[in-house]
Amino acid sequence: MTARATDRARYDRATAHLDAPLALVDLEAFDANADDLVRRAGGKPVRVASKSVRCRALLERVLARDGFAGIMSFTLAESLWLARSGFDDVLLAYPSADRAGFAELAGDPKLAAAVTVMVDDVAQLDLIDGARGGGREVVRICLELDTSLKLLGGRVRVGARRSPLHSPAEVADVARAVARRPGFRLVGIMAYEGHVAGVGDAVAGRPLRSRAIRLMQAAARRELAERRGAVVRAVRAVVPDLEFVNGGGTGSVQHTAAEDAVTEIAAGSGLYVPRLFDNYTSFHGRPAALFAQPVVRRPGVGVVTVLGGGYPASGAAGPDRSPVPYLPEGLRYDPQEGAGEVQTPLLGSPADDLLIGDKVWFRHAKAGELCERFDVLHLVEGDTVTATVPTYRGEGHTFL
């Protein structure tokens, strides 16, 4: 049997007592992926991106491993919940307008010590001050640097539209505003190079596009390494005791870790390895998170229909945002229907070996978004489910 066929047999045995739909995490693959992130980080700590995991039990598991330290969260409400749950180093990766959350943060010494919030505009400091509601705790601040690559005098931009702070002078100006302002303490800088860390450079069947991506990413890494170093020097001139400089993502861990200015790496998707992370030359992970849908119809030769499965991922709409049928190998969508809300027909010769009630295993396009569809994850070791743990959704939280 192929390695994938062996995995399918294991997963089917492990979940034989469970009805689909269901989601699982293969702990052997999860742990191997964690080890690979630590190896690529080259001794710098890896901060876990919670949006790519969305399960407290698995956050606890990975943070118990050597080489990992801290969480990068995605909403203020989530940050406060994690801090109340005992996580003592939570960096909120995005600015927030959650006034009630800021009032809670500024009024609680434990939360204020554990949570760092993201800022890239003085107006965000105004919002936090206006939301304090009498809370006097010092709010920890991280500044976000725009990592985009600008070419032809800025007429061409490559990268996500995030922070407006691009130059060392712009970041230093906001750093001075934070340093002068009572009730705030600047502790960190974050710079996420999504056009490098989140874009695969080996697109199947697209050799010219892949080469163009590799050339772009090489240029982007060179430009950002120089600029990020200058930004850190400029900010340290204002705040010498800066605690951390965070950078990277699953697809750029080893490149970002090589920069002297960076003190820690962010990564999360590399633990589950969803399908969007198949197209990289810099690393190869093991798919660890999958979901199963049951066969409910056999419409004809070479066709089965499974229940549901239409779980598109966020981002620009396109085929790469859909889950992919993974096990058994050889199944594909009907191009006229794709992945459906209530039912999904699948084509291919393996369909003829599937019976009503059998499981078809899928991989989601993006990591943590799978957990918005399932309230529990079944943790598999070998061919046994050794634990069943709640996702954020299973604990009653849908933060976005």
Image: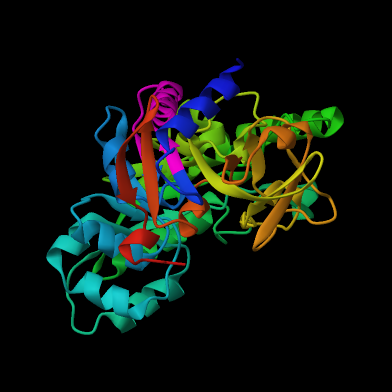
Q: At which x and y percent is residue 10?
A: 47, 27
Left or right? Give the position of 383 relative to 79. right
Position of 93 compared to 354: left or right?
Answer: left
Q: Is residue 37 left or right of residue 57?
A: right
Check the image and tell me how it is coloured.
rainbow
Rendering coords of residue 212 (x, y %): 80, 33
Residue at image coords 23%, 84%: 133
Q: Main secondary structure of the magenta part?
A: helix
Does residue 155 sit above or below 249 in this rendering?
A: below
Q: Which residue occupies the extreme top position in the image?
A: 1
Quadrant of the snapshot with the N terminus? top right
Question: As drawn, is 282 to the left or to the right of 156?
Answer: left
Residue range corresponding to the magenta coloring: 24-47
- Is any atom of residue 195 visible in this view? yes
Q: Residue 109 colored magenta? A: no
The x, y position of residue 299, in whole percent, is 78, 50
395 to 101, vertically: above or below: above
Is 46 inside the magenta-drawn segment? yes
Could you tell me which residue is drawn at 47 percent across and 32 percent down? 11
Image point 73% across, 58% down: which residue? 317
**Closest to the observer, 296 or 83:** 296
The answer, for residue 366, to whether it is visible in the render is: no
**Front residue (pair 133, 55):** 55
- Res 116 → quadrant: bottom left
Query: Residue 354, position in %: x, y?
Result: 66, 37
Indicate whether 74 appears above or below 248.
below
User: Does residue 137 lie above or below 270 as drawn?
Assistant: below
Residue found at the very far left of the displayed protein: 109
User: Residue at (23%, 58%) from the top-left corner?
Assistant: 83
Total numbered circles: 0
